[in-house]
Amino acid sequence: MFFVLLGYATIVVVCLMHMLFVYACAKKDNSIIDPWWGVGFALIALVTFIAAGLYLPRHILITAMTCIWAMRISVHLLRRNRGKPEDARYAKWREQWGDTVVWRSYLQVFMLQGLFMLIIALPIIVVNTSTDPGLTRFDFVGFLIWLLGIGMEALADYQLNIYLSNPAHRGRIMQEGLWRYSRHPNYVGEMLIWWGMWVIAVQVPYGLLALISPLTITLLLRFVSGVPLAEEQMKKLAEYADYARTTNIFIPWFKRK
C-alpha cells in the first residue's frame, strides 16, 4: 500500500510542478511557486487519503492537520507576495542563469522543490497506509507538537506582519513577542509541525523511514533556504549586530545581556 500511495503522490507532485513551471515561464516569475507549496501537500494528503479508502481516525487526523497547515501557509504567502515583483531570491538566480534560466528553473526550482515535497510528505503518506482503527498516545503527542508548531508559526507571522505594517519600523528589526526569544520563531514553528506529524507516523509500518521528513525540513530551514537567507537580509540593518549578540538564532531562549 505504501508504494501505491507514494506513486499517486508522485503523480500529483509532477503534474503540479509542470503546470506551475509553464505558468511561471509565461509570467517570468518563479516566485509563484511559493504560495503553492502548502497546496501541494494538501493535494498529496487528500489523494492518498482517498486512494487508501479506509477513512480511519488516524487518516482523518493527519489529512486534516495537513490541510489546515497548508491553507494557513498558502494564504499567508499569497498575501505577502500579492502585487510584488519576483522574489529577490528568484530574481537573483534569473540574472545569474542568463540564457540557461528556463531549464535551470525547471530543474533547480520546480523539480527540486517537487522532490523535497515528496520527501517531506512521507509522514502523511505513511500514516494513510495505517490499518489500526484506533488512536494511540503517539497520535495525541504528535498532534500536540503539531499544534504548538502551527500556533508558534502563525503567531510569529502575525506579529511580524503587524510590526512591518508600521512605517515607523522601516529599516528596523522585529524584536518583540516571539521574536524576542528567537531570530526565526516562524521557522521553529514550521520545524515542530513536521516533527509532530512524524511522531504520529513512527508507530505504523515505514514510520522510521519517514524520519527523513523532519530531518530534511529542519536542515533546510536551519542551514539552507530558511535561516541563512533571512539572516543575509537582516545583516543589512543597523540593529542586526546587537540583535544577533543577544538573541538565539533558532531555538527560543531568553535574551543574553
Image (tube, helix red, strand yellow):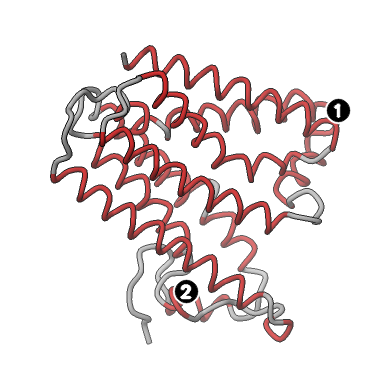
Q: Nearer the viewer, residue 221 or 20?
A: 20
Residue 188 horizontal side relative to residue 2, left or right: right
Q: Please name the amino acid that badge 2 sits on.
A: Trp
Binning the other alpha carbons within 10 Å of mark 1 as few (below 14), some (14 to 19) or many (20 upward) gives: few
Q: Which residue is mark 1?
A: 99
Residue located at (49% from left, 73% from top): 244
Q: What is the number of the mark on residue 221? A: none
Residue type at mark 1? Asp
Q: Position of residue 162 (x, y in %)?
A: 61, 76
Work out which quarter of the rendered image holds the C terminus and state it: bottom left
Q: Say which element carries label 2.
A: helix
Q: CA distance from mark 1 to mark 2?
A: 41 Å
Q: Of the two numbered discs 1 and 2 on the same chain, state the one appearing first in sequence.
A: 1
Residue at the extreme left of the image, as rendered: 137
Residue 255: x percent and y percent?
37, 81
Q: Is residue 149 left or right of residue 156?
A: left
**Where in the figure is residue 96, as x and y percent of width and height?**
79, 39
The residue at 74%/39% (across/down) is 30
What residue is disc 2 on? 179
Q: Is residue 197 left or right of residue 32?
A: left
- Vertical placement of 65 versus 72: above or below? above
Residue 40 left/right relative to 208: right
- Looking at the rendered structure, the number of numbered marks drawn on it comes to 2
